[in-house]
Amino acid sequence: MPSSDPVVSVIMIFRDAGRFIAEAIGSVEAQTFTDWELVLVDDGSTDDGPVIVAGHQLRLGERLRLLHHPGGGGRGTGPSRNLGMQAARGRYLAFLDADDVYEPRRLEQHVQCLERDPDLGVVMSPERYWRSWQSADSHAASEGDRIIGPAVTPGRRIEPPALIVATLLTRGAPMAALCSITFRAEAFGRLGGIPDGFNGHYEDQALICKLLLDGPAIVLDECLARYRQHPASLTQANAPLEQQRGTPAWSARKRYLEWLGPYARSRGVVLPELDDWLRDELALLESAAGGQQSWTATHLLPDRFAAWLGGLRHTRQQRSLRHRVMRRVEELKRTGPALDRAIRRYWNERIHDTKLSDDAPGSAGFYAALDAYRLQKLPYLPRLVDFGAWAGRDVLEIGCGAGLDLVRFARGGARVTGVDVASTAIELARDYSRAAKVPAVLLEADGTSLPFPDASFDLVYCAGVLPFAADPAAIVREAHRVLRPGGEAIFMADNRRSWLRLMESVAGSRAGHGHADAPGFRLYTAEEFDRLLQPFAERRQVVERLPTATSRHTGLTGAVFNHVVVPVAQALPERWVHPYGGHLWAFCRKAR
């Protein structure tokens, strides 16, 4: 027996893979990272594949283990992958199908990422759709290879479920190949492996979805695997059959689509884009040729025309969905250092809001105009937040801006500290606290990495920052860290399901959000906001900013708003209107 378990187990399932398996095994042997084992699962081969594996086993000894299902024979892809994961001894698991190939630094790069970040669950990298392995004069080779990877900025940790969105429409690839993913072995026991019933197709996507919904992932920028394209591969052989109703391939895709939505919801993920995509894909499957279909009006039309009409309807639905999903993907792309720099630059330039006042920034008139504007947008603020309840206690504001709310806390007797990524904001807040004659500690700092020890504050106040943050989850984690046991946090975000969104849709703008052009701006549903705040043991949400008459809106838009929208909202029962306020507030408490 080996003296110790390997760091990583590479699992390779195969059936009749004698043509390619030696090259796949050779690519594992060629890895620059050498602390690995190779677990092979024979799923009922009838060719010379097992003989080839036996030759490698003689040379590699216990670094290569060959497994069979009880009683021999084939059980399918899902049970075979589960068997390999169950037998693996490594603390990290990776897959390599018998017709694919690793690049030499594949394991080294993935293991390094997992070792550096103990909370990271999955490492992914792009794969090469490998057509050029064939003879140069073949049609497939002439098409050339393509490198496919998730449409996110490489190198930045991504919290679930963001990567699920990115992989729906990832440069033409619906989901990464298993050869490009490494994850922690403990996830197999916790998640239960591949679900029952995935025995021939889509078992890889089911496993990947489980992993991406379970914990943070990171995507590398280097292509580290070659995903061989050939007609006999499981994916290519099944692709055309998925459109033939009743075939095993059609049933496998249907099973996957019907499984994914309920599974995501069981993990607390409510994602409208995913639900829309699943609904449309299931509708397309149900309209596939062959077999019995439910009766619709299209049955009165010739079959070919009915199929064309159904396809046109699906295309329109998919185009609309694609636009929505790609907007989300573009948000994901705007992450990393470039987004951090853009955010700092934007707020340094825009924190003044000089359009609100003719007075010079930093003057008494400037602060008066800025404060009046804030209370006009948030008239409920003094009622909702008790700024005088923290006398003699330590309050931190993340994203303090010009210091308007920070000064309110200070006037109430709190010991206040403010941080902001914009140096201009810190200068304005410092001038305002001096003018108000209240003490304040003010620092230019990022809320994702606060320069304070654990348990430093009684309250963390973060109003309107999370919608503009590059990494809002990190800000929440940091807020939780610096709070004392039993301490409280107050967060505010913009509501995606609000009357403001309806007005913006009608007006064709995002005028309801004063800084909707800011880099990284996003909206939250109540469910998404609550998931973001899950580090806190206690969470209570309040929805505010209901329609009230204002002089800020002029012309026809102002007339419709003040004389139609506001009266209707006020006439309706409050329980109908209140969930659709423009702002989501959360009052959280850290466990004692």
Image: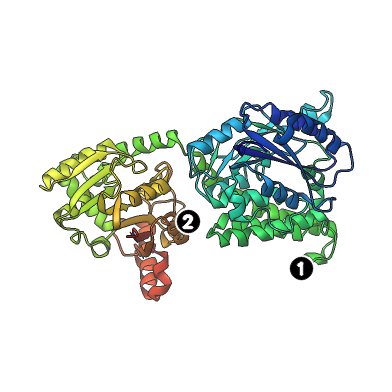
Q: Residue at x 58, y 50 (%)?
A: 187
The spot of residue 571 in percent (x, y) is 37, 75
Residue 167 rendering spot, x and y as whole percentages: 61, 45
Which quadrant holds residue 105? top right
For the point 39% across and 69% down, the residue is 578
Quarter holding the N terminus is top right
Q: Quarter-wise, where is residue 338 in the image?
A: top left
Q: Residue furthest left?
A: 437
Amino acid under label 1? Answer: Thr
Residue 320 in view, yes or no: no
| Residue under label 1 | 296
Q: Quadrant of the C terminus?
A: bottom left
Q: Amino acid at mark 2?
A: Ser
Mark identifier at residue 459: none
Residue 500 shown left or right of residue 170 in the figure: left
Element class at badge 2: helix
Q: State the colouring used for the structure image.
A: rainbow
Residue carrying label 2 = 505
Mark 1 surroundings: few (<14), some (14-19) or many (≥20) residues within 10 A: few
Please identify, in this view, whether the residue under mark 1 or under mark 2 is nearer the observer: 1
Q: From the viewer's perspective, tell me whether residue 285 is left or right of residue 422.
A: right
Residue closest to the eye, 61 or 348 = 61
Classify 10 Å Cα crowding around label 2: few (below 14), some (14-19), many (20 and above): few
Percent x, y for residue 223?
A: 63, 31
In depth, the one of 403 and 472 nearer the eye is: 472
- Most foreground residue, 406 or 474: 474
Q: In the visual, does 220 lie left or right of 536?
A: right
Q: Can residue 256 be seen by looking at this rendering?
A: yes
